[in-house]
Amino acid sequence: MANRREFIKISLYGAGILAAGAGTYKVIKALSKEEEEEIKKLAIDLKRTPTYCEVCFWKCAGWVYKNPDGSIWKIIGNEDDQNCNGRLCPRGTGGIGMYYDGDRLKTPLIRTEARGKQVFREASWDEALTYISEKMQKIAKEHGPECIALFTHGSGGKYFGDLLKAFGSTNIAAPSYAQCRGPREVGFMATFGEGLESPEPTDIRDTKCLVLIGSHIGENMHNGQVQEMSDAIDKGAVIITVDPRFSTAAGKSKYWLPIKPATDMALLLSWIHIIISEELYDKNYVEKHTYGFDQLKEAVKSYTPEWAYGITTIKPDIIRKTAKEMADASPAVIVHPGRHVTWYGDDTQRSRAIAILNALLGSWGRRGGFFRPETFEMPTYPHPDFPEPVRTWRDAFPGKYVLADLALANGICDATIPVTTRDCSFKGWIVNGTNLIETLPNQKQTIEAIQNLDLLAVVDTMPMEITGWADVILPECTYLERYDSIRTGPARTPQIALRMPAVEPSNNSKPAYWIARQLALKLGLEKYFPHENLEDLLDWQLKETGSSLEEMKRIGVKTFPRSADDLYFSDDEEVEFYTNTGKIELYSTSFLNEGFDPVPTYTAHPEPPEGFYRLIYGRAPMHTFSRTSNNPYLFDLMDENLLWVNPKVAKQWYLKNGQEVFLENQDGVRSQFPIKVRITERIRWDSVYMVHGFGHADKKLSRTYGRGASDAKLITNVMLDPIMGGTGMRGNFVTFILDKAETEVAS
Ligand code: SF4
């Protein structure tokens, strides 16, 4: 086991990077020769096993090194992996903490008192799985199998997904869709005929201009992107950051546009207006590849920079200058699509505006813009067809969210609360690797839904708020203790990566495949899980591709040639896009067909009431939301969140740096724990900011319990995106509750 001091030393290099921005990973390279030699020497002596990281969705491939006594020493990136180029981020290095966390779930538990009271008894695996399978069968008999839903985040979801489909339900949702990236997938799909997926095909390493609008590369530590951004900065790329907060990326930018929150659409439309009216767009590309230019031109003609200034507070000359910077770099320019884009309810249209801007600049399919990724397709093992479900989550929302291509986690949550207008509601949830209490907005509603369930089974490695509400808790082992599916995913060159156990599962925890298969056996669905061990299945799959488990154990990552030399469009290429017109749609026919604006328009959003401030939340590079806040190593790097407050606001409220305050939102909901104030010019006076994932209320998380505040608790106003059902969460406002009653707000 790496000692803590050593881990912190290495991880702080990573964290320091983020403040440093450019030249990011040079810090790691700057280890002394002796240190490098020492690491290499040690590594040769140690046994290593391949893995890919599970601390975030980027899934960097690495090697797990073990000490001679069998304990884990270190995880180091795999040099051949495109996602990480041999360098893990601080969280990836700290992944070992997931294995060594003493708070882990250790054995199956069955609830013995009312939901939420957190009183459980230990159970054997057989008893716990029998309990779940009997409840599932009862629900299926009384209501239909489709009344069971799966919420998932992470690698294990594949097996529980297969189990559910075999059982007769396709209601499989990930909060990472409707609470995060869904609007941009739908917005880009409507424009280019394909979504972005993960990792996004942004060609940042060759870009000349990167526009970050509400995207915080460096704080959202998506490894490959951070490395490429660092390289691009070194090569002189212009960075334009639009953010009400002076983020780490803003510190590396030529332009920081401290926009008034909730007005991004006005800026985007104004940029589109300038690029068209000043003829800055890529004329050949637009003429050859797009549909609806004239309609777009007409629709945006009134969105002048002067108009946008009054809304965004960004001066017209800056709007013009930044538009010109983008056009000068075209097509090697990226208006970054962002990731967590569920803000104000018009998020699909905002993502559409970003997609349109990229199309006008000719960056889609071009070097320095967006490359054309390729994914290696692993063969699927033969099994009977899954049964056709009688109903799906869509039946709960007739005629709505037609353009959503995945199930909505919040939709399933809504449809669990019985209403007289709906003839069926969800009765059972299986939750794997997602703390729904913190990830779904509107906690009150989530708890109300849970109270209406006949079954809540939670499969996780750690106790979380959601486990406290479960009927049955199944302890999953960590990614360091199990095989998982072969990692594929879009990349410049198709690649696969193996994860295998470096150590035996701790305590009485089990891998997701084993759990799903045992449930399948109890439900009579074994024909869908013909392989007793995942190991056998992986070996079969790999042999079909010309590799083998043996080979992958040695190399960890395997790269295959692209099927065609088409990373970028060639100049004379006739491209058929998967849209209704076969072109890039500047004017969306699919939106028009569904009754939505074919071109984005500006909508004003509510402003904070007097004495309230918009609640903005984000990420820290050393944590993946609430998932890692109890990790012993990462907790050492950041043990609570702080509330960023502008000095002007602090003065009005007599706030001091480090002072603890409670927060209350527009609906009278208070934070459960206080949060310390950080007074900084880096946030606008109309907003406050905190990192998401703290303020845990589960005492079983011994380190992080009660540290900082939970933004999720304060998000009670949810603005639904009418196009795809995403949950806009940035329309919440908070005020300070000070512990000294005599403190008054200055007039
Ligand atoms: S970016 Fe970091 S946390 Fe995410 S997979 Fe890579 S190493 Fe792990």
Image: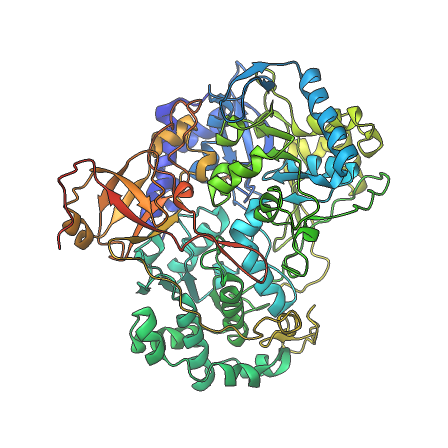
Q: Is residue 547 visible?
A: no
Which residue: 22% across, 52% down? 646
Position in image of residue 700 (x %, y %)? 44, 22
Which residue: 38% across, 28% down? 704
Q: Quadrant of residue 271?
A: bottom left
Q: Is residue 62 visible?
A: yes
Above or below residue 217? Residue 61 is: above
Position in image of residue 576 (x %, y %)? 71, 72
Q: Quadrant of residue 656?
A: top left
Above or below residue 360? Residue 86 is: above
Q: Quadrant of residue 38?
A: top left
Looking at this view, is 635 or 330 the one in front?
635
Does 381 sit left or right of 260 as displayed?
right
Looking at this view, is 668 or 192 the one in front?
668
Which residue: 65% across, 32% down? 554
Position in image of residue 379 (x %, y %)? 78, 44
Does 398 sit left or right of 185 as displayed?
right
Above or below residue 14? Residue 476 is: above
Does 76 sit left or right of 107 as displayed?
left
The count of marks equals 0
Position in image of residue 518 (x %, y %)? 74, 24
Question: Could you tell me which quadrant the C terminus lies in?
Answer: bottom left
Which residue: 40% across, 28% down? 633
- Identify the image's colour scheme: rainbow, by chain, secondary structure or one colour: rainbow
